Image: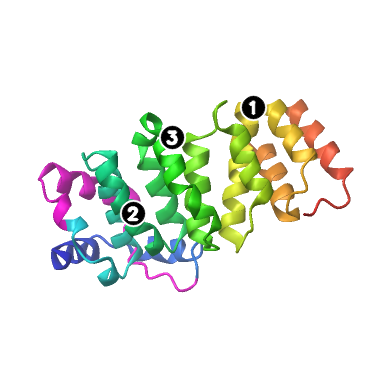
Amino acid sequence: MRTEVLTYLQNNADEKYRQFSLKLLPKDTKLLGVRIPLLRQYAKTLLKEGRGQLCLKIPLEKLKYQEEFMLHALILANAKISSQDKIPLIKKFIPHIKTWAVCDIFCADLKEVKQNRDLFYETFKPLLTTRQEYQIRFFYVLALSYFITPEYLAKIFQHIKKQTYTGYYDKMAVAWLISIAYIKFPKETEAFLFNTPLDEFIFRKSISKICDSYRVTKEAKIHLRTQASAIKTHKA
């Protein structure tokens, strides 16, 4: 099955897109250059044909290219199986996530989390203690997609406050999360931002991402920038 999949991917590779995408990914990323809409369509076709499970049975250790991991993520996320059956497969896949692109598309497509928030929250919360950059990122991207709610907001903020970060991509995920939280819960998020000893990079990047959003008013952006500029140091 992997030979068939790899042939499809190689036949649909776009060299210009590959060169462009490589600039946005970690230096050691193996990339063919297949555009995401094509990967989505291929995953949908394989699932419709009943061959998605065959793809999921390809040993993860044999996968080489980002597109192979992304296809696995799309098939797994959209497979019509119970959450109880899917979660072990997700756990098995997470350690093989090595780029933000695979992480983010996987989380975005795990829409069943909305119906099983408690189960997914409790299952994947332990990732925060792994000291693994992309495993930490997985939790926070999952959180920004499904856990920015009145029930979970305070819990997520507490995780951020206590988190030990290991790299650039876990910190970026947290800044992204805070920007989404501000859009949905501005008062609570502003209070958290300015009353919590956050990592300096996360604090500044959160302000930047909030101010980049078209869903935040001009007045609110001015207010946040003024508040942030008054803080000379904001480190943990």
Q: Is residue 221 above or below residue 101?
A: above
Give me the disc on residue 118: 3
Q: Secondary structure at mark 2?
A: loop
Label 2 near label 1: C-beta < 8 Å? no
- Separation (CA) of disc 2 from disc 3: 34 Å
**Position of residue 179 measured from the top left corner of the image (x, y, whole percent):** 63, 38
Closer to us: mark 1 or mark 3? 3
Magenta residues, start to end: 27-54
Among numbered discs 1 and 2, the one appearing first in the sequence: 2
Give me the disc on residue 35: 2
Closer to us: mark 2 or mark 3? 3
Give me the disc on residue 185: 1
In front of the other: 151 or 165: 151
**Quadrant showing the C terminus:** bottom right
Type of amino acid under label 2: Arg
Type of amino acid under label 1: Phe
Q: Is residue 23 left or right of residue 76?
A: right
